[in-house]
Image (cartoon, rainbow, N blue to C red):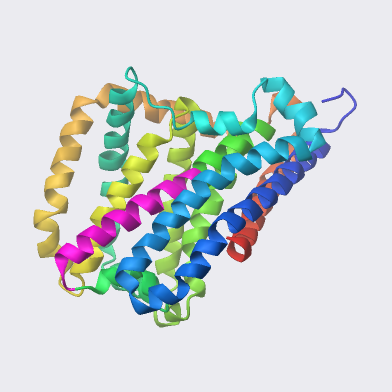
């Protein structure tokens, strides 16, 4: 940044450039996922259980391929990116993205440990509390996911074996493409353009709005508005935790692992509907919560340090960014622009991918 450049100008410029790149990558995702979805459209109607699950798998594969490919292309297309971002890091953004998937013999056990901790300390307690305090969200979730979407009809299948195979394929695919998109791309790439906490906020807002979008499902007219609002709040907060983890550790496998397994557990709650949640929780969630408590005690020092670091790191978001000479008014501009960018990315994503 030049000495004469105003912080507000840099805030607007960097986020605009990031948004342009997001649009280009989203277009790439559309190209890589449109043809498979088009081919499977009629097949899903004929056999929603089989081809519905496979459509999720193909979507995950398409997103995994599209993001690094189009990051590579934007490296050549966007001149400002090559000059001001890539040369500073001396690394191609596609390579940087792919490194998030690196698992070595020396770090595998730690990636597994963090994945297990995120699952048992973050995901499972949150879901349990919401299902316990707001059991109506179970019915809302089932109906929202299956309304006019036959790909999710596995949730309504009485055959547990078919449900289990479907849920494994679907939810591992969902975990892969949601983490790849929200954390692997938006969080990581955003942090290359501007301060990390803005990238965390924008990606978490995008992730939360993606779940709040079920509010626009016609079925939502039959339910209180706080159901999708709770869904938004939950996913927004989880998004912050996961994004902070990714930027600190540069690992995406623990996030995919925890996200997918939690979705599989939650899917069992949805599949159990309309049976009462309380009896079901006794042999599903209670044992899991006990395991989580044991893990919390065992890894208390690591968890405490992670919480302290996370709160300290994200707390910087609400302070002036001294690196670019922010004033109080610049900070408020940054927060408002981040809100706008997160919302715009969500809107673009709705129409493109």
Q: Residue at x 17, y 73 (%)?
A: 158
Residue 193 lies in quadrant: top right
| Secondary structure mainly formed by the magenta segment | helix
Q: Which residues are magenta?
A: 158-180
> In the orientation shown, which residue stands out farthest toward the top?
106
Q: Residue at x 36, y 79 (%)?
A: 46
Q: Residue at x 76, y 30 (%)?
A: 82
Q: Residue at x 46, y 73 (%)?
A: 41
Residue 171 rendering spot, x and y as whole percentages: 33, 54
**Location of the C terminus (image quadrant):** bottom right
Q: Is residue 174 magenta?
A: yes
Q: Is residue 180 visible?
A: yes
Q: Nearer the viewer, residue 59 or 4?
A: 59
Residue 162 rendering spot, x and y as whole percentages: 20, 65
Q: Is residue 183 left or right of residue 8?
A: left
Q: Nearer the viewer, residue 119 or 277?
A: 119
Q: Is residue 187 magenta?
A: no
**Location of the N terminus (image quadrant):** top right
Above or below, 75 relative to 148: above
Q: Is residue 319 visible?
A: no
Residue 233 lies in quadrant: bottom left
Q: Is residue 258 left or right of residue 62?
A: left
Residue 208 rendering spot, x and y as whole percentages: 49, 55
Q: Nearer the viewer, residue 80 or 316?
A: 80
Residue 104 lies in quadrant: top left
Residue 203 rendering spot, x and y as whole percentages: 55, 46
């Amino acid at each position: 940044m030049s000495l004469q450049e105003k912080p507000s100008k840099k805030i607007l410029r960097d986020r605009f450039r990031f948004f342009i790149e997001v649009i280009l990558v989203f277009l790439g995702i559309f190209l890589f996922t449109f043809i498979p979805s088009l081919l499977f459209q009629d097949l899903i109607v004929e056999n929603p259980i089989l081809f519905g699950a496979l459509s999720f798998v193909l979507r995950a594969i398409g997103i995994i391929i599209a993001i690094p490919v189009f990051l590579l292309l934007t490296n050549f297309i966007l001149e400002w990116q090559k000059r001001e971002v890539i040369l500073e890091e001396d690394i191609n953004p596609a390579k940087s993205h792919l490194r998030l998937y690196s698992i070595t013999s020396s770090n595998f056990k730690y990636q597994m440990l963090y994945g297990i901790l995120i699952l048992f300390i973050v995901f499972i307690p949150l879901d349990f509390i919401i299902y316990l305090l707001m059991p109506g969200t179970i019915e809302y979730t089932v109906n929202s996911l299956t309304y006019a979407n036959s790909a999710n009809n596995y949730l309504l299948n009485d055959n547990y074996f078919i449900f289990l195979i479907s849920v494994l394929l679907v939810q591992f695919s969902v975990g892969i493409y949601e983490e790849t998109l929200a954390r692997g791309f938006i969080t990581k790439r955003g942090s290359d353009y501007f301060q990390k906490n803005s990238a965390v906020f924008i990606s978490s807002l995008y992730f939360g709005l993606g779940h709040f979008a079920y509010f626009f499902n016609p079925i939502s007219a039959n339910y209180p508005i706080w159901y999708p609002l709770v869904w938004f709040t939950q996913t927004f907060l989880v998004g912050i935790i996961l994004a902070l983890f990714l930027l600190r550790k540069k690992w995406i496998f623990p996030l995919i692992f925890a996200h997918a397994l939690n979705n599989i557990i939650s899917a069992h709650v949805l599949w159990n509907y309309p049976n009462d949640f309380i009896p079901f929780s006794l042999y599903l969630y209670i044992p899991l919560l006990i395991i989580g408590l044991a893990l919390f005690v065992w890894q208390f020092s690591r968890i405490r340090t992670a919480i302290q670091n996370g709160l300290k790191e994200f707390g910087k978001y609400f302070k002036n960014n001294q690196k670019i000479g922010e004033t109080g008014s610049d900070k408020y501009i940054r927060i408002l622009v981040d809100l706008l960018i997160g919302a715009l990315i969500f809107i673009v994503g709705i129409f493109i991918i």
